[in-house]
Image (cartoon, rainbow, N blue to C red):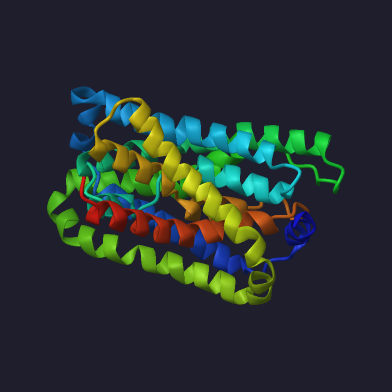
C-alpha cells in the first residue's frame, strides 16, 4: 500500500491554470453566500450560552488538527508525506457550507450550528494558516527524520503565504457578504436563498472536472485512499460528538458539534494546495489533491447518512 501511495504523491495532476483560478472564485462565492446569512445576532450565543460554542470551537480548531497530527504520526510508516499533509490540511480548514442544513436534518441545535459557522468562518482567517503551518511543518520534519522511503523536496510552509491566500479566498468574500447583509438587508433577503442553493453546484462541478481529467489516476489509486478518508472523516464526527458528551452537553448540541467537526471546507484545502505560493511545483501534491477532493465528496455522504440515522432514531 505504501508503495502505491508514494507513486500517487509523484503523480502529475491535470488541472489547468484557468481551473485553479475558477476554484478560487468558486470558494470565494461559497464564502460570500455563507456571509450573507451571518448577522451580529449569530454571535450573541457567545455571551448568553458560551459553553456549547466553546466546546465546538475547541473541537474544530484545537483538537481536530492536534489529534490529526497524532494520527498521521502514528500512521507515518504506512502513508506517504503528501497523504499525511493532506489530512492535516483538511483538519485545519473551517466547517463546510452545508453543515447548517445537515444539522437541521439531524434535529440538532440550529442556532448553535449557525453560530459555530459564523465563528469558524471568521476565525479561519487566522487559525487555518496557524494550524496548517504548525502541524504541517512538524509532520514533514518528523517524516523526513523517521522514514527512508523517499526524499522529500524541501517545503517550509510559510504562515504569511497561507494567510495571504486565506484573505483573498475567505476574508474578502466574508467582509463583503457581512457588509451587504448589514447595509442592505432587503437586497440580501432576496438573493440569499438562491445563492445558498446554487453555491455548491459550481464546486461539485469543478471537483467532477478534476476527477474526470484525472480518471486514470482516480481508478488506479481510489482503493488506497478511500479508506483513509473514510477513517479520518469518521474520526472527526466521533471526536466532535464524544468531546461534547465529555463536557456533558445536551444531545442536540452533541449532534451539532459532531457535524461541525466532521464537515470541513475541503474546497479551501484544494484552493490552498494548488497555489504556487504555498506548494512549489517540485513538491508532490498527488496525495494532497486526492485527500481533499475525496473528502469534499465523502463528508457530504457521511453527513447526510448520520443525519438520517439521528433523524429517524427514537431516543
Q: In the rendered image of this protein, does residue 183 appear above or below residue 204?
A: above
In the displayed structure, does residue 169 sit left or right of residue 181?
right
**In the rendering, at what x and y percent does residue 311 appear?**
24, 54
Which image quarter: residue 138? top right
* Residue located farthest toward the front when viewing the structure as drawn: 314
Residue at image coords 28%, 24% = 51
Residue at image coords 49%, 49% = 233
**In the rendering, at what x and y percent does residue 261 appear?**
41, 42
| Nearer to me, 28 or 75 | 75
Image quadrant for the C terminus?
top left
**In the rendering, at what x and y percent does residue 35 appear?**
30, 47
Q: In the rendered image of this protein, does residue 1 appear above or below residue 131?
A: below
In the displayed structure, does residue 176 sit left or right of residue 77?
left
* Residue located farthest toward the left when viewing the structure as drawn: 186
Q: Is residue 123 visible?
A: no
Residue at image coords 34%, 31% = 245
Which image quarter: residue 200? bottom left
Residue at image coords 46%, 34% = 61
In the displayed structure, does residue 87 sit left or right of residue 205?
right
In the displayed structure, does residue 276 sit left or right of residue 315?
right
Q: In the rendered image of this protein, does residue 191 appear above or below residue 142?
A: below
Image quadrant for the N terminus?
bottom right
Counting the numbered discs, the total is: 0
| Nearer to me, 276 or 150 | 150
**In the rendering, at what x and y percent does residue 312 appear?**
23, 56
Q: Is residue 280 visible?
A: yes
Amino acid at each position: 500500500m505504501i508503495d502505491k501511495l508514494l507513486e500517487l504523491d509523484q503523480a502529475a495532476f491535470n488541472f489547468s491554470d484557468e481551473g485553479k483560478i475558477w476554484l478560487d472564485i468558486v470558494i470565494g462565492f461559497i464564502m460570500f453566500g455563507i456571509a450573507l446569512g451571518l448577522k451580529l445576532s449569530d454571535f450573541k450565543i457567545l455571551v448568553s450560552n458560551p459553553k456549547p460554542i466553546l466546546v465546538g470551537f475547541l473541537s474544530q480548531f484545537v483538537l481536530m488538527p492536534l489529534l490529526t497530527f497524532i494520527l498521521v504520526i502514528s500512521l507515518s510508516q504506512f502513508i506517504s508525506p503528501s497523504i499525511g499533509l493532506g489530512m492535516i490540511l483538511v483538519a485545519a480548514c473551517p466547517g463546510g457550507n452545508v453543515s447548517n442544513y445537515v444539522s437541521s436534518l439531524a434535529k440538532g441545535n440550529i442556532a448553535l450550528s449557525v453560530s459555530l459557522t459564523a465563528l469558524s468562518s471568521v476565525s479561519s482567517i487566522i487559525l487555518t494558516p496557524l494550524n496548517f503551518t504548525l502541524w504541517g511543518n512538524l509532520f514533514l520534519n518528523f517524516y523526513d527524520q523517521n522514514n527512508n522511503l523517499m526524499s522529500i523536496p524541501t517545503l517550509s510552509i510559510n504562515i504569511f503565504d497561507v494567510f495571504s491566500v486565506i484573505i483573498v479566498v475567505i476574508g474578502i468574500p466574508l467582509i463583503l457578504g457581512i457588509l451587504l447583509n448589514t447595509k442592505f438587508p432587503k437586497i440580501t433577503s432576496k438573493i440569499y436563498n438562491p445563492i445558498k442553493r446554487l453555491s455548491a453546484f459550481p464546486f461539485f462541478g469543478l471537483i467532477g472536472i478534476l476527477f474526470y481529467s484525472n480518471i486514470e489516476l482516480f481508478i488506479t489509486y481510489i482503493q488506497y485512499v478511500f479508506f483513509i478518508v473514510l477513517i479520518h472523516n469518521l474520526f472527526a464526527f466521533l471526536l466532535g460528538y464524544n468531546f461534547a458528551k465529555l463536557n456533558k452537553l445536551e444531545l442536540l448540541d452533541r449532534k451539532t458539534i459532531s457535524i461541525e467537526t466532521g464537515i470541513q471546507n475541503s474546497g479551501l484545502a484544494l484552493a490552498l494546495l494548488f497555489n504556487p505560493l504555498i506548494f512549489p511545483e517540485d513538491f508532490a501534491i498527488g496525495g494532497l489533491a486526492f485527500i481533499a477532493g475525496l473528502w469534499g465528496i465523502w463528508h457530504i455522504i457521511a453527513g447526510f447518512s448520520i443525519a438520517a440515522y439521528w433523524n429517524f432514531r427514537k431516543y
